[in-house]
Image (cartoon, helix red, strand yellow):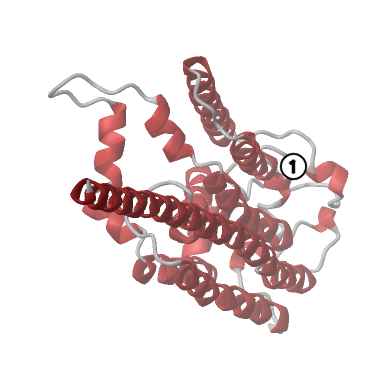
């Protein structure tokens, strides 16, 4: 029986961490991740050859972010995630909440804008198309909190508590589309809050924190709903293969616990990053004010000296 649509039978041995981490690549995500890493590496090398600096921390953050996607989608975790709600929930939480944060802290858009060559006059190259996208009405809509927060919440409730989830899990293409959706929603949600890349919406730091906390409680409520349910709620995971030796309800409770606990991790990560960004912004502003004060002071001194010189000239 091929329940997954992955060309993989569901007759899996009981889950262990070792089996979960065995190599089992999804071709789509493997190619996408390698291309993402390759393009980022090309951008960094291009800047370095030009003599421009690029923070090592950004490169590390981006690489780890992409590697977390590979870990979820190119190992046995992806196979077990087709038949175990708890493992699937780990995939969902990492790809929608941890991977986007790490990728965004890597500032891939800023790197692209700095590394891509400028097209000739009147021509449009990749850099110009990227800039046009960043300034488009579409981007203003999909990064607006009025869109990102409801979408972030709907990705849980409207997906798992309707037949849509079972439909998507029934085919390889559907499963890939769902995982890409989780990543895209995570990027759209966290970009205005934490992203160092330029974007249409860049609210103040206090507002960013409010946006973060507007979405997170719904994750916790979703987790609690799964933990407290007295029967399996998702058709796909109602009858796990006997070879796994698991109970569907216990596995669902574990999935709920993962969803509930995981909402804390990104919140802490984002808050730490926001506080560092806020502190850095304040420091830059203070330095700008100091420079402006120095310039004003120099002007006042020059004016005072000119005034003294004019007095001396009059007395002479």
Instruction: Give the SS element for disc 1.
Output: helix
Residue 217 in which image quadrant:
bottom right
Q: Left or right? Give the position of 241 relative to 168.
A: right
Residue closest to the eye, 187 or 212: 212
| Residue 313 shows in this picture | yes
Residue 40 in picture, x, y percent from top left? 52, 29
Residue closest to the eye, 144 or 231: 144
Residue closest to the eye, 82 or 227: 227
Residue 276 in which image quadrant:
bottom right
Residue 127 in picture, x, y percent from top left? 31, 30
Q: Which residue is depicted at the point 69% across and 57% down?
A: 90
Residue closest to the eye, 225 or 63: 63
Residue 313 in picture, x, y percent from top left? 21, 46
Q: Which residue is depicted at the point 35% across and 71% down?
A: 146
Q: Residue furthest top?
A: 49
Q: Residue furthest front?
A: 316
| Residue 162 shows in this picture | no
Q: Left or right? Give the position of 71 relative to 294.
A: right
Q: How many marks?
A: 1
Disc 1 crowd, CA 10 A, few/some/many (<14, 14-19, 20+):
many
Q: Left or right? Give the position of 12 relative to 315.
A: right
Residue 229 in picture, x, y percent from top left? 68, 82
Q: Which residue is depicted at the point 80% across and 68% down?
A: 247
Q: Which residue is depicted at the point 56% across and 47% down?
A: 105
Query: Which quarter shows the C terminus?
Result: top left
Q: Which residue is mark 1?
A: 76
Residue 68, compared with residue 117, is above or below; it is: below
Q: Residue furthest left?
A: 122
């Amino acid at each position: 029986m091929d329940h997954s649509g992955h060309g993989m039978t569901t007759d899996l041995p009981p889950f262990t961490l070792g089996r979960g981490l065995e190599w089992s690549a999804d071709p789509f995500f493997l190619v996408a991740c390698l291309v993402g890493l390759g393009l980022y590496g090309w951008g960094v090398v291009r800047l370095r050859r030009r003599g421009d600096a690029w923070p090592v921390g950004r490169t590390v953050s981006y690489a780890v972010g992409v590697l977390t996607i590979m870990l979820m989608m190119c190992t046995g975790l992806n196979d077990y995630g087709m038949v175990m709600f708890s493992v699937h929930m780990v995939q969902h939480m990492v790809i929608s909440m941890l991977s986007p944060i790490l990728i965004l802290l890597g500032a891939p858009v800023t790197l692209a804008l700095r590394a891509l060559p400028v097209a000739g006059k009147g021509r449009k190259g990749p850099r110009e198309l990227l800039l046009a996208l960043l300034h488009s009405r579409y981007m203003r809509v999909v990064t607006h909190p009025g869109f990102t927060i409801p979408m972030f919440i709907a990705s849980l409730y409207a997906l798992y508590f309707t037949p849509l989830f079972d439909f998507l899990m029934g085919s390889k293409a559907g499963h890939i589309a769902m995982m890409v959706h989780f990543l895209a929603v995570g990027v759209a949600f966290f970009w205005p809050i934490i992203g160092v890349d330029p974007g249409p919406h860049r609210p103040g730091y206090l507002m960013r924190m409010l946006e973060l906390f507007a979405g997170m409680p719904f994750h916790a409520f979703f987790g609690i709903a799964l933990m407290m349910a007295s029967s399996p709620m998702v058709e796909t995971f109602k009858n796990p293969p006997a070879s796994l030796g698991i109970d569907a309800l216990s596995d669902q409770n574990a999935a709920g616990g993962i969803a509930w606990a995981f909402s804390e991790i990104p919140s802490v990560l984002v808050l730490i990053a926001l506080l560092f960004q806020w502190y850095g912004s304040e420091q830059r502003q203070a330095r700008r004010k100091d420079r402006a004060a120095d310039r004003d002071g120099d002007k006042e001194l020059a004016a005072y000296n000119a005034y003294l010189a004019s007095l001396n000239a009059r007395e002479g």
